[in-house]
Amino acid sequence: MPIATTTTANVPQHVKVVRPKNDDGSPLYPDYMPFYDPLEKVEDIGPFEHHDPGHRADPKLPTLLKTMTKMWDLSPHVGTEIHGVQLSQLDSAGLDELALLTAKRGALVFRDQDFANIGMEAQKNIVRHFGPLHIHGWAPHPVAGSEEHMIIYDHKDDLRVRKQWAGRSPVQWHSDQSAEQQPPGTTFICMLESPSSAGGDTLVSSSVRAFSRLSPRFRKRLEGLTAIHNNDDGVRTELKHGEKAVMRRGICKAEHPVVIVHPVTREKALYVNPVYTKRIVGFDQEESDYLLKFLFDHIARGQDFSCRVRYEAGTVLVWDQRIVHHSQTLDYPVGDRRHGFRLTPLANKPIPAKVERDED
């Protein structure tokens, strides 16, 4: 007897979930359309003292979870989805608890949020709770203003992202702006418009688990090492746009520990990534390349300590860049619109892990 099969093409249209789109093809959030100004320049924030809000948080999370209706882990080691909590309504105590839970779970997914509709200044006021906001060196801002908003945009009318990844995999695990002297901490992505039916997800992986999965003696060899991070690859890619290239500041370069400690949880995490980490300090180039390739491959293979975040209308992703890696996906049809923004608070200077003692 033949086996019955079902494909989405056979499913009645009223059963399929289709993400919101305007009938005329225009963007849902025109004020957040990307704006590129080749003449724009910005100054570095410079060194600052960072006080992590997670230190102030009540570990029982009474304010954050007061209105929570549903909550579950997306995977054992990273990612939790929360329903019933409006980020825009959290007071200072709730935001402190948000920082703590994000530090513990790596990434939090909030559904049915009004965050996209409260205005740019209100959005920035909330996210500044976690640190001064980073301004990207070349990524677009919204046409309506706010240089701190980094616009995420891919559509047939702006194929910069597609062209950037032409000929290579767009799945690149990284921590944003790790070449900063004080890289980002608790970060927000608000997705404004997603591809019509599926795709455009964010992949998230635990760098805490990536480190702990290594053998004790190998972990000991990594602790105490430092690595050079820089963003020269991104700068070179942007400069290919010629007169239309946006270069608000020069190349960023920093030396960070290979293994860091989170300032609140004190958990150790692997702090290297294939986008920004270039060289292990004190190693010959061949030695450095060999070790970094192993670590990058180890991160990429870590499907058992990762999760996948699917965006629906009203989704906000909050994650702690100090303890997770993430990657985009470009798995949806070329020309479909993916549109969102990121607000990126800078945090502490990475804290080096102390060398472990030998274990039997």
Image (cartoon, rainbow, N blue to C red):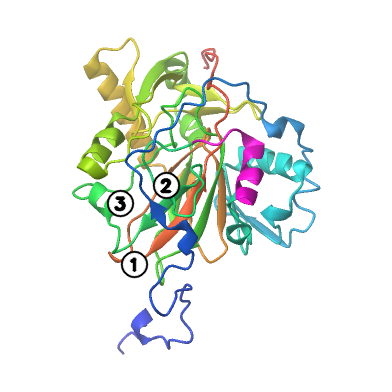
Q: CA distance from mark 3 to mark 2?
A: 25 Å
Q: Quadrant of the N terminus?
A: bottom left
Q: Residue at x 24, y 34 (%)?
A: 236
In the displayed structure image, the side of residue 69 where residue 234 appears, left or right = left
Which SS class for mark 1? Answer: loop
Instruction: Decide which of tag 1 and tag 2 comes sooner along the chain.
Output: 2
Q: Which quadrant holds residue 115?
A: bottom right
The amino acid marked with disc number 1 is Asp
What is the x, y in percent for residue 138? 36, 39
Residue 142 painted magenta: no
What is the x, y in percent for residue 171? 33, 47
Q: CA distance from mark 1 to mark 3?
A: 13 Å
The residue to which callout 3 is attached is 161
The residue to which callout 2 is attached is 303
Q: Which quadrant holds residue 214?
A: top left
The residue to which callout 1 is attached is 336
Viewer-proximal residue among 138 and 288: 138
| Relative vertical location of residue 107 with respect to residue 51 in this rendering, above or below | below
Is residue 200 among the parts visible in the rendering? yes
